[in-house]
Image: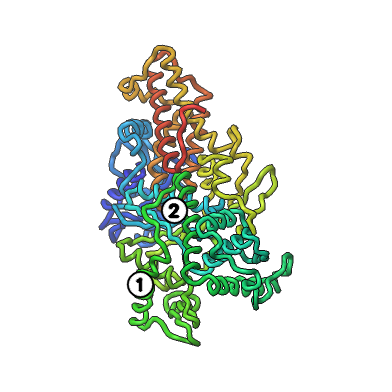
Amino acid sequence: MKTELEDLLARALESLQGTLLHTPVERSAIVVERTRDAQHGDFACNIALRLAKSAGRKPTELAAAIVAALPRSPLLARAEVAGAGFINLYLAGDAQRDALPRVFEQGERYGTSQAGAGARVLVEFVSANPTGPLHVGHGRQATYGATLAKLLQATGHDVHREYYINDAGRQVDILTVSVWVRYLQAGGIGLPFPVNGYRAGYVQGIATRLAVACGAALQRPAAAVLAGLPPDASEGEAEATAGKKKELYIDALIARMRELVGAAAYEEVLELALAAMLADIREDLAAYGVEFEQWTSERALARSGAVDCMLGRLAAQQQTYTQEGALWLRSSAFGDTEDRVLVRANGQQTYFAPDLAYHLDKRARGYARLIDVWGADHHGYIARMRAGLVALGAPGDCLEVCLMQFVSLYRGGEKVPMGKRDGQFVTLRQLREEVGNDACRLFFLMRSHEQHLDFDLELAKSRSNDNPVYYLQYAHARVASVMKQLAARGLQYDAAVALANLGALDGAHEAAVLTAISRYPELIAQAAASRAPHLLVHFLRDLAQAFHTWYNAAQFIVEDDAIRNARLALALATQQVLRNGLGLLGASAPETM
């Protein structure tokens, strides 16, 4: 409908070329939007305001000319000039009702489009370090990424979902040594646990697996482990003094483990820990209904030579230089605030090097648009990644980053403490087990990803209209209940009678439901284009509210065949749209509540 109105305006503007307009108007410049107040029409357009200066006309004068040039259409009842030059468009009485046949014809495809024209998009999301279970923050990222991918698919994009496994680097080494220390402690070795180690119970579980796998082969005396190590920070020590001490201690402990058990055994412990954590992450995401076409390992990427190849390519293009023994990228020449280190003086690569090689690999696989879902704390990383891609010959805008703000859990008005390193965190699995997948999905998507989210656990479990999950699903279930009541009275829904009598849907409540249903395809296109799944949640809540209001004000199963079937058609169309929308959100559409 929105597209059809824009086409009508485009034809009107084309007819004015050579008279009022001196140059052709780009089709993309013509945008109509839903009005907030029905008194101002169903849609409005500001094209006259935008073209007035170049046309040398007053906006109101140009708007009047456009209105006069609009082709006749059964879609449009009238158009009016309003305010400083807006064009208000009023739909014909049958226009909103015309959406119902499309809903029934298209079914689960209603709302989809080919706006993406098959463009290849790679959406990388979650990509949590495999050093612990997924927590609620990862859950928000997973929900957002999975829903965005579905929205892009619904608008005709060729979407590929990917998880980048950060299985190399210091955090994985800290997990490895944490498991080894717990293994030693379980074997009776009196060792203090490092302040900067991973303390949660899952580490003990991996240590138990290690003991089963290798027995006492990796046990070492406490004296050998601790000899010559720098002092660790003490519990409760001020961060100003503790920060450096705990970092130095954990690095020294990692080096000592490598020395005492050997490179091969160290690698075995690391692989065992990674396998355990990745299996947990995969299982958790699968149970949550989040799937990926590909899981890419940072370690495997490095072993393939992709990182070295990328570094060689940058060097050949003279985009790197050496300073004080470190290899730097001239990223400041490509929009970054400063140059960035790729390889440290000690020969170790920074996180930036494999990450840049990974994004180059995505481009090499033919993905023109790279969408990454990152935590808000990675904001400073965007400029350097784009600069690196530009230095490698890719357009900087090929990378689009959606930053996820943080989640706070509340129980009974009290904030739930969370901290991953010390083990005080709520896992995604625990959250799902408490409130269910559907509540997780919708609550995570209720607010824009750019806003902080407060997750009310008690509200998510409540069976009340204040709970948006219950409110939406209840609307879907109510339609199913109506159809059961119809069957119980020995009656049947007649689609032919319904479609022949849609004019019977002439009440204000019915008009509100019809407007929402007709708006659904526009909403899907908008949510996908603006990377805003929360818009779909808000739309479905508005549709459910319109339906509940109508349901409470009218009887559906009446004696008059024409009215009964027309109302049932509108109810069934509402149910279909709710089911389609909930499906995109990854939530269920129950028949009973």
Amino acid, disc 1: Gly
Q: Position of residue 560 (x, y in %)?
A: 40, 14
Nearest the viewer among 326 and 561 is: 326
Q: Please, is residue 16 above or below residue 225 in the view?
A: above
Secondary structure at numbered mark 1: loop
Q: Position of residue 406 (x, y in %)?
A: 58, 55
- In the drawing, what numbered circle is on residue 305? 1
Nearest the viewer among 290 and 5 is: 290
Q: Please, is residue 179 above or below residue 540 in the view?
A: below
Q: Position of residue 445 (x, y in %)?
A: 51, 47
Q: Position of residue 321 (x, y in %)?
A: 42, 85
- Within 10 angstroms of label 1, few (less than 14), some, or many (20 or more) residues? few
- In the drawing, what numbered circle is on residue 5? none
Amino acid, disc 2: Arg
Q: Residue at x 34, y 60 (%)?
A: 55
Can the viewer see residue 69 in this picture? no
581 lies left or right of 70: right
Can the viewer see residue 530 in this picture? yes
**Residue annotated with mark 2:** 531
Quadrant of the snapshot with the N terminus: top left
Secondary structure at numbered mark 2: loop
The reply to whether discs 1 and 2 touch (Cβ–Cβ < 8 Å) is no
In front: label 1 or label 2: 1
- Within 10 angstroms of label 2, few (less than 14), some, or many (20 or more) residues? many
- Sequence order check, earlier mark of 1 and 2: 1
Toward the bottom, the furthest residue is 324
Nearest the viewer among 383 and 27 is: 383
Q: Residue at x 48, y 87 (%)?
A: 323
Q: Disc 1 versus disc 2: distance between alpha carbons?
A: 34 Å
